[in-house]
Image (spheres, rainbow, N blue to C red):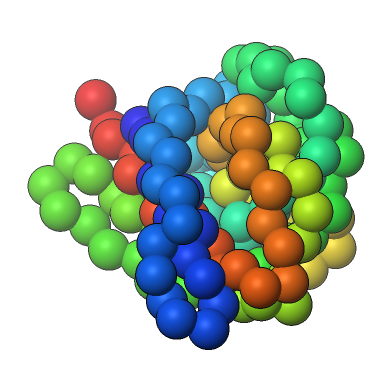
């Protein structure tokens, strides 16, 4: 899958930057999906509910179970499905997730608004600075198969 990051001016709505980044669907996320498919799920297993951002520059790996330095997370704003592609979109306001963002992830199962809670499904390395005059939309496409 891939993630589109759209940084906009918070006052005018004008697009300042757009990034398209491939993501890593990590092993623990794959295990959660497998458990959900088998019918043995618990704690909303297999359901992605939060997007989080952090500041670590470490590359994403299949073995990751969380962000290295999470600074903010928010519930997914919009979800949709088209064929075998699930899309998860999160909108960060001018007062949210400000700083030099270097990592992002999708969390689910028993995730909450607590940093690194729940199961990490997908992670990516980013390089975007968001200030209090910017909004950020992250739109993740997860392709099955």
Residue that appears at 28% across and 35% down? 143
Residue at horizontal 71%, vertical 36%?
102
Name the quadrant of the C terminus: top left
Q: Residue furthest left?
A: 83
Q: Residue 144 at x, y = what percent?
A: 28, 33
Identified at 23% across, 44% down, the residue is 85
The residue depicted at 52 percent of the width and 71 percent of the height is 9
Relative to 86, is 122 on the left or the right? right
Residue 76, image x, y percentages: 52, 67
Q: Quadrant of residue 61?
A: top right
| x and y, in percent, of residue 93 in the image | 62, 77
In the image, 14 versus 24, the foreground residue is 14
Q: Nearer the viewer, residue 45 or 20?
A: 20
133 to the left or right of 90: right
Looking at the image, residue 94 sits to the left or right of residue 115; the answer is: left
Residue 105 versus residue 125: which sits nearer the camera? 125
Q: Quadrant of the N terminus?
A: top left
**Residue 120 appears anywhere in the view:** no
Q: Position of residue 39 (x, y in %)?
A: 45, 47
Left or right relative to 27: residue 53:
right
């Amino acid at each position: 899958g891939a993630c589109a990051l759209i940084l906009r001016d918070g006052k005018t709505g004008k697009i300042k930057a757009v990034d398209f980044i491939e993501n890593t669907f990590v092993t623990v996320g794959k295990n959660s999906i497998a458990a959900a498919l088998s019918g043995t799920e618990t704690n909303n297993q297999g359901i992605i509910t939060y997007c989080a951002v952090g500041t670590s520059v470490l590359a994403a790996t299949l073995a990751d179970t969380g962000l290295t330095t999470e600074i903010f997370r928010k519930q997914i704003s919009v979800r949709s499905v088209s064929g075998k592609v699930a899309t998860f979109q999160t909108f960060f306001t001018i007062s949210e997730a400000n700083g030099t963002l270097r990592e992002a992830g999708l969390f689910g199962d028993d995730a909450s608004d607590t940093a690194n809670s729940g199961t990490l499904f997908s992670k990516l390395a980013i390089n975007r600075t968001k200030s209090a005059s910017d909004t950020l939309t992250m739109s993740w496409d997860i392709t099955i198969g």
